Amino acid sequence: MNTNPKIHLVEIPIGGNGGLLWNRLHEEREGVCEAMLRGSQSISGADLKSSYPNSPRRQALLQERLRELDDALDRLMSGSYGHCSKCGGWIGDAVLEFNAAEALCLGCSEVQHRHVRGKQSAA
C-alpha cells in the first residue's frame, strides 16, 4: 500500500484473512437484512402465534446488529479491524472468532457494561 491516507478499493485485500473476514461479516449482514425484511411484512390473523418475530424488541436488536456489522466492515476497510475502538488495543483472536463484529477489547467492554448496569440500577 502507498502512504496516501486515502483508501482505494484496489488496495483492499480480497483474498486471505481479509477476504474471509469480509465474507463472514457480509454473509451475516445479509442474513440480518433478510430477517428484518421478513419481520417487517404484515401478518395475517392466522399468523398471530408467529407475531413474536415481528416484535419491536426483535427489530431493534436486528437494527443494532446491522450497525455493528456495518461498523466492523468499515473498520476492516480502514485497516483498524481487530483494534479496540476505545483504547486502540488488540481485541483478541478468541473474542473476534466468537463475535467478528466486536469493537471493544475485554477491558473496555467490561467498563462499558458496568456503566450501563449502573445507569439501569439508578433508573
Image (cartoon, rainbow, N blue to C red):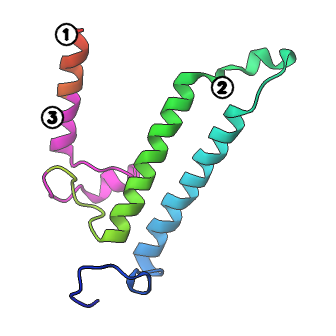
Q: Return the disc, 3 or 2, that comes first in the chain's sequence.
A: 2
Q: Name the mark on residue 54.
A: 2
**Looking at the image, can residue 40 be seen?**
yes
Say whether marks 2 and 1 touch (CB < 8 Å): no
For image coordinates 56% across by 23% down, the residue present is 56
Q: Is residue 20 above or below residue 98?
A: below
Residue 59 picture quarter: top right
Q: Is residue 42 above or below residue 71?
A: above
Magenta part of the protein: which range?
87-113
Name the amino acid type tagged 2: Asn
For image coordinates 21% across by 54% down, the residue present is 84
Q: Secondary structure at mark 1?
A: helix
Q: Where does label 1 land, which residue?
A: 122
Q: Return the disc, 3 or 1, that comes first in the chain's sequence.
A: 3
- Image coordinates of residue 70 in percent, x first then y, are 44, 54
Q: Quadrant of the N terminus?
A: bottom left
Toward the viewer: 70 or 105? 70
Q: Return the disc, 2 or 1, that comes first in the chain's sequence.
A: 2
Tag count: 3
Q: Where does label 3 land, which residue?
A: 111
